[in-house]
Amino acid sequence: MNNDIQKKWEMLHSQSRFRPKYPSEQIVQFVFRNFTRNEKTKVLDLGCGAGRHVYFMANENIDTYGVDISKEGISNAKKTLEYAGLKATLKVAAVDELPFEDNIFDGIVCYGVLYYCKKYEIKKAIEEIYRILKPSGKGILVVRNKKDYRFGDGKEIEKNTFIIQEEDSNNGAFNENGMTMHFFEKDELQSLFSKFKNVFIDEIIETHENGKFCDSNFKVVFEK
Ligand SMILES: C[S@@+](CC[C@H](N)C(=O)[O-])C[C@H]1O[C@@H](n2cnc3c(N)ncnc32)[C@H](O)[C@@H]1O
């Protein structure tokens, strides 16, 4: 675990504007399509941050778990749940060392997390996902790709991995300055998920200001 990155996340999570409240449409669709919404369905939100997807799933009666590297993120997620009278199991942990037994989750959601990791952590995190999913358990992963406007910002430390250095404070990437950011390629994801079955890799692209900025992600849906 990189302590500088952890500190940066503690700082971001301490500001309410970095704590999105509403779930991503991608996660809502995936959960509704794939899981029975009751307390027998166990789903982990990997890198849950301030807990918008933890809240969403707990509110749907799912047996919800969340982990994040940031204590501040987990603490905010706990407050949101408490306020709503909902329950979930939340732990501070890194994506590449998960505090769970093998084969216990029906599902995993991981939105906007793994691109902040170095390649060895990403590889280990995906091995961990495989380990803790039940056979036939399903997951969704959303990660940035090379069409994203941030690609190429800052110093490249590994292939397609940069230490973000955005000069313009009006750009969202400015808040990510100093962070590691990996931009995925499709064949890289195919290789990382080669042990899984029914792997579908699609793109989510959203442009802003007449196309000046492009947020571009891969959505990977997979099954153990
Ligand atoms: C952009 S936020 C997304 C949070 C949440 N998934 C959501 O969609 O609201 C990225 C999150 O990843 C967490 N994170 C970054 N690196 C991590 C790691 N190595 N292990 C666990 N969590 C990590 C950060 O603390 C942060 O909460």
Image (spheres, rainbow, N blue to C red):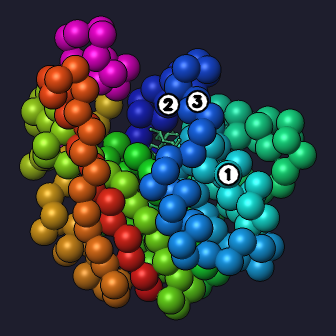
Relative to 118, is 185 above or below? below
Q: Residue at x 15, y 28 (%)?
A: 211
| CB of mark 3 near ligand 1 (< 8 Å) | yes
Q: Label 3 amino acid? A: Arg
Which of labels 1 and 2 is toward the front?
1
Which of labels 2 and 3 is toward the front?
3
Q: Label 2 amino acid? A: Trp
In the rendered image, residue 156, in percent from the top left (x then y), is placed at 11, 36
Quarter-of-image position of residue 214: top left
In the rendered image, residue 106, in percent from the top left (x then y), is placed at 60, 79
Q: Earlier in the sequence, mark 1 or mark 2?
A: 2
The residue wearing badge 3 is: 19
In the rendered image, residue 38, in percent from the top left (x then y), is placed at 77, 73
| CB of mark 2 near ligand 1 (< 8 Å) | yes
Spot the residue most to the right.
Answer: 85
Q: Which residues are magenta?
A: 161-176
The residue wearing badge 2 is: 9
How much space separates mark 1 and mark 2, taking CA atoms? 22 Å
Quarter-of-image position of residue 173: top left
Q: Residue at x 25, y 82 (%)?
A: 194
Q: Earlier in the sequence, mark 2 or mark 3?
A: 2
Relative to residue 118, is residue 133 drawn left or right? right
Relative to 105, is 203 above or below? above
Q: Label 1 amino acid? A: Phe
- Quadrant (top left, top right, bottom left, bottom right) of the C terminus: bottom left
